[in-house]
Amino acid sequence: MLILGGRYGSIEPKSGLSYIEVEYDHATARGKPLFALVVDKKVIDERATVDESSIEKTAIERLSKFREKVLSKISRTIEDPKDVKIYTMDSLKKFEERSDLIGWVRANKRADASSREARTTLRSDGVEAPSDYMSAYQAVHYIADESQWGATRNAQVSEDGTRRNALIDAPSEFQSRAAEGKVKVFGASPETGRHELIPKTHWMSYGLDLSTVYKPDAAGRTTPATFEAGFHGARDGKHRYSDLKIEAADVRRVWPRRMDFDTAFDEAFEEASLTRDEAISALWKLRSVGVAIRNEPVPSADHFPAWRERYERWRKSVLAVAGKFDVGLQGRLEVLDQLRKAPNLPVVSQEHAKCITIASEMLLRLEERLP
C-alpha cells in the first residue's frame, strides 16, 4: 500500500530514487498486488500554508514524475483523511476476493470460490477485471438512465420543440469528461494486448465507438471522433484501444445518481435531531437538494406546479431545520431583505423566476453561515 503526499522521502544512494519509489518499483516488477492513494495537490498546497515542512523543497521534479507514474496505474486521489480508511478497506476487500492470490489457505480452494469467480470478468489478456469496473455499455447506460445528468438532459427541450435524448448524448458527454481527466479508462493496446491507462489527450480526438456502446455483449473500443482525427492518427501511429474498462467509482462521482427528493428530505429530517452538529449536517444535505431543485429543468408551464410543490417543501424543510441550528439563521432565510442575482436558468413564468431567485439567495446564505 502506498500513500503519496507532498514529500518525496529519503534517497537510496545507488538508484538516486527515494526508498519509497524503489520499493514501489520492486513490487510492480514482481507483479505484487498493490494499491495507491495519492493526496490531491490542492490539499497539499493548503497544508503548506500551515506547515511548510509538509511539502517537498528539493526533489520537486522527482516527486512530480513519481506522482505521474503512480497515477498512470490503478490508484485513487484522496482529499480527506477519512478517504484513507474507506479506500483501504475497499481495496483490501477486492484483494480478498481475488482467487489468484494464494495464501495459507488457497483462495481458489475455498467453498465460495465459484461465487467469487462469477463476480469477475475476463480481460483480453487473461487477467481478471474486478466488478468495480464498468464496460462502455454499462457506463453509457448508467449516465443516460440512472444519473441526475441523464434525468436533466431528458427533461430539456431544444429550440425546435423536440425533447433531448440522454442516451444519444451520453457518449459525447463521456468523451468530454474523459478528455478532462475526470474518468479513468483502461483499454487493451493493439501493440501489447495488455490493458493500460488511456491518456486523457487520447479523448481529445477519439471517442467511444457507437457500434459497441449500445450492444450489451460488445467489448467497448475507441474510434476517431472525426475523419481528420482518423487520418492524423493513422499517420502518427496512434492506435485505438479495445475492451474498455472504466472506473465505476469515477463514473458515479462525475455523474451522481439521480436524486430521489422524497428520500433526501426523509434523510435530512432523520438526522436533524436537537443536536447542533446533526442540524448542520442536515442543512448541508438540504442545500444539495436545493441546488438540484433550483437547476431542475421545467419543460413547460404545465410542469411548474409539480416543481413548485417540491420547491416549497424544500424551503419549509430548510427553515424548520435552521431553527434547530440557529434562530438567527432561520430569520435570515425567512426574511430575504436583499436578493442577489440568480444564475441565468431557463424559466417558464415570472413566478418560476422569482422562486429560482429566492432559492439562490437561500443557498448563498446557507453557504455563508454554515460551518
Image (tube, grey):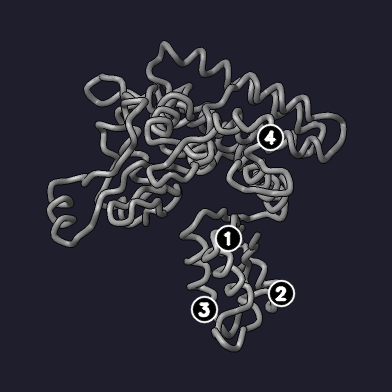
Does residue 341 appear anywhere in the picture?
Answer: no
Q: Which of 231 and 287 is in front in this view?
A: 231
Crowd tier of the residue under label 2, counting other residues whose Cα lies within 10 Å: few below 14, some 14–19, many 20 or above: few
Disc 2: which residue: 51
The quadrant of the rendering that contains the N terminus is bottom right
Marks 1 and 2, the one that precedes in the sequence: 1
Residue at image location 47% in from the left, 45% down from the top: 127
Distance from disc 1 to disc 3, alpha carbons, whole Å, reads 17 Å
Tell me the amino acid under the disc marked 1.
Answer: Asp
Mark 4 and mark 2 residues within 8 Å of each other at the beta carbon: no
Viewer-side label of 4, 1: 4
**Quadrant in the picture for residue 16:** bottom right
Q: How far apart are marks 4 and 1 (CA)?
A: 39 Å
Which numbered disc flags the more N-terminal residue, 4 or 2? 2
Q: Mark 4 points at which residue?
A: 110
Residue 339 appears anywhere in the view: yes
Q: Nearer the viewer, residue 35 or 214?
A: 35
Q: Which class describes the residues within 10 Å of circle 3: few (<14), some (14-19), or many (20+)?
A: some
Disc 3 designates what residue? 62
In the rendered view, tell whether residue 20 sits above or below residue 361.
below
Please tell me which of labels 3 and 2 falls first in the chain.
Answer: 2
Q: Which mark sits nearer the N-terminus, 1 or 3?
A: 1
Give the image location of residue 371, x and y in percent. Answer: 74, 48
Please state which amino acid type lies under the numbered disc 2: Asp
Element on which disc 1 rests: loop
Image position of 39 with respect to 355: above or below: below
Gap between marks 3 and 2 measured at Cα:
21 Å
Horizontal arrangement in the rendering, residue 320 relative to residue 340 (left or right): right
Task: Say if mark 1 contacts mark 2, CB within 8 Å.
Answer: no
Q: Position of residue 258 (x, y in %)?
A: 52, 27
Q: How far apart are marks 4 and 3 (CA)?
A: 44 Å
